[in-house]
Image (spheres, grey):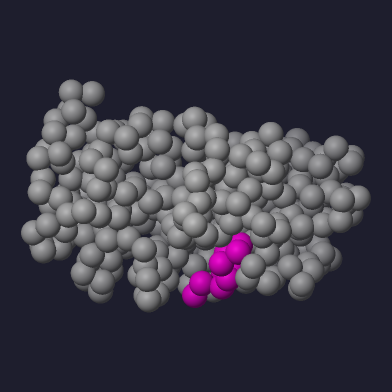
Amino acid sequence: MSEARQWLERIRALDLPPRVRIMNVCGGHERSITLAGLRSALPPSIELIPGPGCPVCVCPEEDIYQAIQLALQEDVILLAFGDMLRVPVNVKKSEARSLVEAQAAGADVRPIASPTEAVSIARDHPDRAVVFFAAGFETTTAPVAAMLAEGVPENLSVLLSGRRTWPAVAMLLESESPGFDALIAPGHVATVMGPEEWGFVVERHHMPAAVAGFTPESLLAATYSVLRQHLSGERFLDNCYPGVVRPGGNPTARRHLDGVLDVADANWRGIGVIPDSGFELKAGLSAHNARLRFPSHEDEARKRAGEMPPGCDCARVVLGRIYPDECRLYGKACTPRNPVGPCMVSDEGACRIWWAGGVRQQRPRVA
């Protein structure tokens, strides 16, 4: 903590402009920032904006709906990471609106923590079809790719909803109003893919950027770095997580990703299709592709860009357009006990994080 205080003192000594907006992409970063109280410790001119770093929040509704229908209508064991089970979709009140409601209706839905559990369950039940609903960014998708590369039981298939992080940030930067002046890039993604993936922020958009870890010290070091860049006009990608993030990333993880998955355009819930932002199984793995192995339960009407529940502002929160407590439903209709949107479900969702950090009410709206 003494190191954190030193970074705070350095930041406070800077001759800051009236307003500097720094986006932190990663949900893990947002959790550390909020629970460590960094916003209140920093000078008030510094705004830390949560970005599109929650894979559960952006998982398209049609994929969740497909998983629910597979669990209910096919004789399968449906596996998913735990925070996916309570994500709601828009259906009639008489229908299951989440995987946990499908489970309550009799479906065999089981939460897992890692792909190795999926393999174990498939081997323990050779007479059952097992579907692994795998949603996540590069850090979660890489172990899924490794699982597939090493070989899986014949009865195991994957309903993949993997996303790549940087294309969403690129989309924001290429818009007319990105909404931020500097970027703190996600340490875990950079650990897998290499920090070089984030070089475009500096090279193409001339914006200060730094890769950070998940301690207050690393986050404050990255904050100081981008502030210094912002003030001096110097631009470079600073690695403030050097003990873990290395040039080129993790070669084994990248080899598995390249070996079994293709990059494709992908839909982000409430946002729309972002080019080259998703992963899909290569054609050689069609026998383990749940989208091909089972009858389609897709509903084309669910592929609309704005498919969030009525009144839910999760998409604007994910894009950093508003803060969580500016959502119309925050703390009213939407709470962790009764979540309306995905940002209140996941531990990486900004709304859930702010609630855990003690923010219980909407901020007053300016007339």
Magenta portion: prevailing SS class:
strand
Q: Which residue is painted at 40% across and 57% down in the image? A: 254
* Apparent side of residue 230 relative to residue 176 in the rendered image (left or right): left
* Apparent side of residue 161 relative to residue 69 in the rendered image (left or right): left
In which quadrant of the rendered image does the N terminus lie?
Answer: top left
Res. 37 image quadrant: top left
Of the pair 224 and 290, the residue shown nearer to us:
224
Q: Which residue is painted at 28% across and 66% down in the image? A: 201
* Apparent side of residue 330 relative to residue 37 in the rendered image (left or right): right
Q: Which residue is painted at 45% across and 60% down in the image? A: 321
Residue 170 location, x and y as percent? 38, 69
Residue 90 location, x and y as percent? 77, 57
Residue 225 location, x and y as percent? 17, 49
Q: Is residue 269 magenta?
A: yes
Q: Residue furthest top?
A: 2
Res. 92 image quadrant: bottom right
Position of 287 relative to 3 (above/below): below
Which residues are the magenta region?
266-275
Residue 33 appears anywhere in the view: yes
